[in-house]
Image: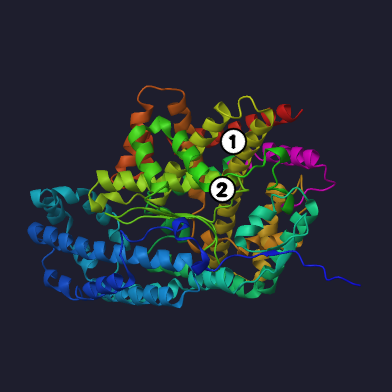
């Protein structure tokens, strides 16, 4: 008699409705129910036309101050509505009602922006002498930072009609990002992959990273090949989408009278282009430690050739362990002890019973992780947390750093000065990762040689991923935007060739560059926010410098870092960092971070014997 053999159970990604509510974020502080959001939207609609009464009066300090107060109230409404709509789409991109809310809000905010297209041009028409008197008026005392920030944009503000057109073009120019997100997060299907035990695992953006950390090279490489096959099947569409995004970047730069797209992107943070160029140059000069690490990785893993699928697997397999989310939250909170008990208390509450965090993957959920905050409301963290990936504990520390930065700056600064730029955001988040590494190395990894090797490997991979990898991305962005500015065709072949050249330069000496890896340039979400990724490298370099000062007990270091977290966007980013104790216009912080990388590779090699 032949008996039927049950097929192995397939581990499926749950639908949103199947997720335990305690594992989701609590959005009721924003809106208790969806109908309240609808009421908020109606209230925002009621603000249409409200700002028109100030037209022609902005040269008078009393009127300008009153106009900004009204604008602030409208912005607060829109920001709260926007945060809720954004988070609901992020938790399930296939939720039609959530996407409908987001689109309706986008339409309304576009109309509001169109209505106030006259505002900045009117301010910009004020002559220098009259402006100098205006800024001295007591009524505008709390708006000094905004006044200064606005005035420096004077050469790049257009006429009223042109500004209206730019406002109307906003959703269209954002189209490539929306298409990329929908295509890769909702439409893509990667199939299933068998793990070492024969269990069928649904391949997704979330499980892809987890599978690349498996000890079986066969499982890793099968998952990697299958994942990139889906990108290969949509490569022409993705290339066209990225090309459209780049064209939009160049259009905006030309329309705003910037020399080029990169100059426009660096302008808000007042970062000289030489800082970007120096960052690339310093990393290019220090590629040997990276290639030495790759040779060590190949040796330890016992591979004939090192491939992209082999770059994330831990070199110390026995250190791989499961860490429940609650345990991870406790580790992160404890690691942040140097920042003070009040910091720890707020963070612990947020990661726990206040439910700032949407913890686990579900179908349609945005991949990766982020922190999102709006003024007067709690910050929220999207995770796709996996208990078997220790790197996700670091991701939680990273996003918690963003959230606490938001929490502190929003309570220390008025609305107009509270929103910190991304450049500073990456310092705060990466600083927390450095504290976590120290906590682990000085705690459980002190006596556990295997765990120590694992944490060293993790820090090495962090610097590799944040400095070397992000700078390679930054160089790619620079090249493709320059190509568009020179009138070159941004085709799939162009992207693949350009990216392969960089892969060969950064990685080629020590590893095999497979053809599908050329498509990696088509799967990076941040490329739809041009010249963003270099900030990760700046952030890591500054965070390493600041954390070393704090952990060494340098006098005043903690106070300076807390001052940095409280400062929000009240000062230019590089000035804020100098005040905190690190000069990013110097090559020293980047060189120091790369030196630490080389030291950690040496130590890891010794620990592994």
Circle 1: element type: helix
Q: Position of residue 271 (x, y in %)?
A: 41, 47
Q: Position of residue 580 (x, y in %)?
A: 37, 34
Comparing 370 with 124, the one in front is 370
Where is residue 550 drawn, in percent x and y?
A: 43, 28
Q: What's the residue at 8%, 58% (across, down)? A: 62
> How packed is label 2: few (under 14 Cα within 10 Å), some, or many (20 or more)?
many
Q: What colouring method underlies this structural image?
A: rainbow
Q: Could you classify mark 1 by the number of other residues whose Cα lies within 10 Å: few (under 14), some (14-19), or many (20 or more)?
A: many
The secondary element bearing badge 2 is classed as: helix
**Based on the displayed image, in which of its 4 quarters is residue 233 positioned?**
bottom right
Residue 18 against residue 323 in the figure, above or below: below
Res. 489 visible in picture:
no
Q: Position of residue 295 (x, y in %)?
A: 76, 40
Q: Which residue is mark 2?
A: 392
Queried whether the magenta region covers residue 169, the answer comes back as no
Which mark's residue is nearer the viewer, 1 or 2? 2
Res. 235 visible in picture: yes
Magenta segment = 283-308
The residue to which callout 1 is attached is: 594
């Amino acid at each position: 008699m032949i008996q039927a053999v049950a097929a192995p159970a397939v581990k499926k990604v749950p639908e949103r409705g199947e997720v335990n509510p305690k594992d989701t974020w609590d959005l009721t502080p924003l809106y208790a129910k969806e109908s309240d959001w609808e009421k908020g939207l109606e209230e925002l609609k009621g603000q249409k036309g409200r700002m028109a009464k100030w037209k022609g009066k902005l040269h008078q300090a009393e009127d300008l101050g009153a106009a900004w107060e009204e604008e602030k109230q409208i912005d607060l409404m829109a920001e709260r509505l926007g945060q809720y709509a954004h988070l609901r789409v992020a938790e399930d991109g296939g939720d039609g009602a959530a996407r409908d809310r987001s689109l309706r809000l986008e339409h309304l905010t576009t109309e509001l922006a169109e209505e106030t297209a006259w505002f900045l041009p009117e301010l910009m028409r004020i002559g220098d002498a009259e402006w100098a008197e205006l800024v001295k008026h007591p009524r505008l005392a709390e708006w000094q930072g905004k006044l200064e920030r606005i005035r420096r944009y004077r050469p790049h503000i257009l006429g009223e009609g042109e500004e209206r057109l730019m406002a109307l073009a906003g959703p269209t120019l954002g189209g490539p990002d929306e298409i990329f997100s929908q295509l890769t997060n909702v439409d893509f299907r990667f199939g299933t992959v068998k793990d070492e035990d024969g269990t069928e695992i649904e391949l997704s953006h979330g499980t892809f990273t987890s599978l690349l950390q498996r000890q079986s090279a066969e499982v890793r490489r099968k998952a990697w090949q299958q994942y990139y096959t889906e990108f290969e099947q949509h490569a022409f569409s993705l290339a066209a989408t990225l090309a459209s995004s780049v064209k939009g970047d160049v259009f905006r730069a030309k329309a705003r009278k910037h020399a080029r797209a990169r100059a426009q992107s660096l302008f808000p943070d007042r970062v000289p282009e030489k800082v970007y160029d120096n960052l690339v140059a310093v990393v290019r000069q220090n590629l040997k430690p990276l290639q030495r690490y790759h040779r060590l990785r190949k040796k330890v893993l016992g591979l004939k050739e090192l491939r992209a699928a082999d770059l994330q697997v831990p070199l110390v397999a026995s250190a791989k362990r499961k860490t429940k989310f609650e345990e991870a939250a406790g580790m992160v909170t404890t690691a942040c002890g140097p920042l003070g008990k009040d910091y720890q208390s707020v963070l612990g509450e947020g990661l726990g019973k206040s439910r700032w965090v949407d913890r686990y993957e579900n179908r349609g959920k945005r991949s990766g992780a982020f922190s999102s905050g709006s003024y007067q409301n709690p910050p929220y963290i999207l995770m796709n947390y996996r208990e078997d990936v220790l790197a996700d504990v670091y991701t939680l520390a990273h996003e918690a750093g963003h959230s606490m930065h938001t929490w502190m700056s929003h309570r220390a600064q008025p609305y107009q000065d509270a929103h910190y730029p991304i450049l500073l955001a990456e310092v705060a988040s990466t600083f927390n990762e450095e504290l976590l590494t120290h906590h682990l190395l000085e705690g459980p990894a002190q006596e556990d040689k295997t765990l120590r090797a694992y944490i060293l490997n993790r820090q090495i991979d962090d610097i590799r991923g944040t400095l070397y990898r992000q700078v390679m991305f930054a160089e790619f962005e620079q090249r493709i935007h320059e190509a568009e500015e020179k009138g070159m065709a941004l085709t799939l072949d162009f992207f693949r060739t350009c990216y392969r050249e960089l892969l060969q330069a950064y990685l080629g000496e020590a590893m095999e560059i497979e053809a599908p890896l050329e498509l990696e340039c088509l799967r990076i979400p941040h490329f739809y926010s041009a010249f963003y990724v270099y900030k990760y490298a700046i952030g890591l370099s500054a965070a390493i410098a600041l954390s070393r000062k704090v952990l060494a007990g340098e006098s005043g270091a903690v106070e300076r870092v807390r001052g940095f977290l409280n400062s929000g966007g009240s000062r230019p980013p590089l000035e804020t960092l100098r005040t905190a104790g690190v000069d990013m216009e110097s090559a020293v912080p980047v060189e120091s971070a790369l030196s630490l990388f080389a030291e950690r590779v040496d130590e890891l090699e010794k620990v592994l014997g």
